[in-house]
Image: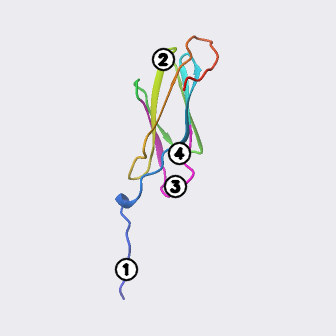
Amino acid sequence: MMLMMTCRCLSDLPPPPPPENVELLPETSSTLILQWTNPNDTDVDILYYEITWLNCTLNVTFEKTDLYSEVIEGGLDPGTSYDVAIVSVSENAFSENVTVSNSTCKYPGSEKESNV
């Protein structure tokens, strides 16, 4: 008896799709909210999301859920623009990154306003 098996290597799998509906929203003069959703069509299991704040020293990793939101409180400067990159991570690869930018509110107590 001959048994034939087909094995698919991890390197043969496509990279995961990037997160969708990515938004960076001002909340206060020192707070921004990063929101995103899972990609709709994916043949690859997304294990987590990796977030890099490009012009400050915050690095965050999130486990997979249906809707994501990261609130960064304190440590951000009023009226300052911030750039954030986010990628989906699978067992063998990273997605293309999605980069968004926005600014914190200019004055403490000022209304939420988007600068995107």
Point out which mark residue 44 bears: none
Measured Cα–Cα span from mark 1 to mark 3: 29 Å
Compared across the picture, whether 53 is left or right of 106 comes to left
Measured Cα–Cα span from mark 4 to mark 2: 29 Å
Tell me where the magenta segment starts and ends, as one range: 36-53
- Which residue in the structure is indicated by mark 1? 4
Describe the element under mark 4 as helix, strand or loop. loop
Q: Is the residue marked by circle 3 packed among few (<14), some (14-19), or many (20+) residues within 10 Å? A: few
Q: Amino acid at mark 4?
A: Lys
Point out which mark residue 64 bears: 4
Measured Cα–Cα span from mark 1 to mark 2: 61 Å
- Proximity of marks 3 and 4: CB atoms separated by less than 8 Å: no
- Which residue in the structure is indicated by mark 2? 80
- Which residue in the structure is indicated by mark 3? 42
Q: Amino acid at mark 2?
A: Thr
Q: Is the residue marked by circle 1 packed among few (<14), some (14-19), or many (20+) residues within 10 Å? A: few
If you read the primary sequence from the N terminus, does the residue marked by circle 4 or circle 2 appear first?
4
Describe the element under mark 2 as helix, strand or loop. loop
If you read the primary sequence from the N terminus, does the residue marked by circle 3 or circle 4 appear first?
3
State which mark lies toward you, 1 or 3: 3
Which residue corresponds to the image point at 40% horizontal and 59% vertical from the top-left? 13
Q: Residue furthest bottom?
A: 1
- Proximity of marks 4 and 2: CB atoms separated by less than 8 Å: no
Give the camera-side residue of 27 and 63: 27
Residue 99 position (above or below residue 93): above
Q: Amino acid at mark 1?
A: Met
Compared across the picture, whether 47 is left or right of 108 comes to left
Which residue corresponds to the image point at 56% horizontal and 46% vertical from the top-left? 38
Q: Is the residue marked by circle 4 packed among few (<14), some (14-19), or many (20+) residues within 10 Å? A: some
Measured Cα–Cα span from mark 4 to mark 1: 35 Å
